[in-house]
Amino acid sequence: MSSTTVRIDPHVHSDGSYDGHEPVELILEHAADIGLDAVVITDHDVIDESIRAAKLADDYGLIGIPGVEVSTQRGHLLAIGVDEMPPHRAPFDETVAWIRDHGGVAIVPHPFQRTRHGVRKKYIDDCDAVEVFNAWLFTGYKNRRARRFAQQHGYPQIAASDAHKLEYVGRAFSEIEIEDVPKDELTAEDVLAAIRDGSTSVNGRRAPIPMAGKHYAIAAARKSGYYTKVGALKAGSTAKFAALKSGYLAKSGIVRSIRGLNSLFSSSK
């Protein structure tokens, strides 16, 4: 019995994503040049460019696998091997079930990282694999924690670059062992089945600390800006309510005063 090893980066963003930079053609060309066998475009909550990349992949000698990083009610989830958008912001477990029903695998990316919408441990009841090595982590702590979690629960382990720029594609990748299928005959379904079976190994290195630090700073600024905006909206609503209440009370006071004067004048007649 012979096996074939496939090298895949299953978590990459293109310019189809709000935070991506590169066209899929450039990503595919680069992936082939650095020795990957497949790269999955997983843009945030959009799938058009990923489907296009999967169709173009064969032109670059790659296995075409579509996917998307979908937002659930509990955080982000990689839907690998689906060719349409999963429901947006649906419950986590329902999204996992939807992905499976549509022939894909559900992988939890950068778990436990709340600043990056990672799903918290208590909400991961079921999935097909866990991303235990994400190249964009500032330190290795969360990767080690994700690996321990996957080992404790028996989930297949995946590594991915989570690249948003071309030079980081393939910085982390997964090796998939596939039995009894020649490399030139491999399909996306073969890769997905091997991931489900846990025939995976993890490879890669973290992004340089200055770049990872910049990534975290942007995330922190985005989060800070969001809460500042929410706080301003709440403050505005509170001020508006207070003004309305003050106006109402003032109006009520004037009305009561007028009624009191009318009553006084009436009694003096």
Image (cartoon, rainbow, N blue to C red):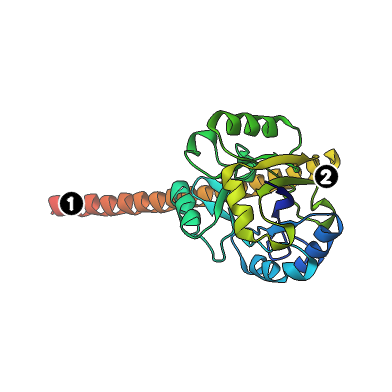
Q: Nearer the viewer, mark 1 or mark 2?
A: 2
> Residue at image x 61%, y 48%?
194
Q: Name the residue under label 2.
A: 211
Residue 116 at x, y percent in the picture = 64, 44
On screen, 48 above or below 264? Answer: below
Residue 8 at x, y percent in the picture = 72, 52
Describe the element under mark 1 as helix, strand or loop. Answer: helix
Q: What's the residue type where badge 2 is placed?
A: Met
Residue 63 at x, y percent in the picture = 71, 62
Tell which of 10 and 269 is nearer to you: 10
Mark 2 burial class by Cα count in 10 Å: few <14, some 14-19, many 20+: few
In which quarter of the view is residue 201 placed? Answer: top right
Q: Name the residue under label 1.
A: 263
Q: What's the residue type where badge 1 is placed?
A: Ser
Q: How many numbered marks, from 0 up?
A: 2
User: Distance between the Cα atoms at labels 1 and 2?
Assistant: 77 Å
Residue 89 visible in the current orientation = no
Residue 264 at x, y percent in the picture = 19, 49
Describe the element under mark 2 as helix, strand or loop. Answer: helix
Tell which of 55 and 230 is nearer to you: 55
On the picture, is 243 further left or further right than 263? right
| Nearer-N-terminus badge (1/2) | 2
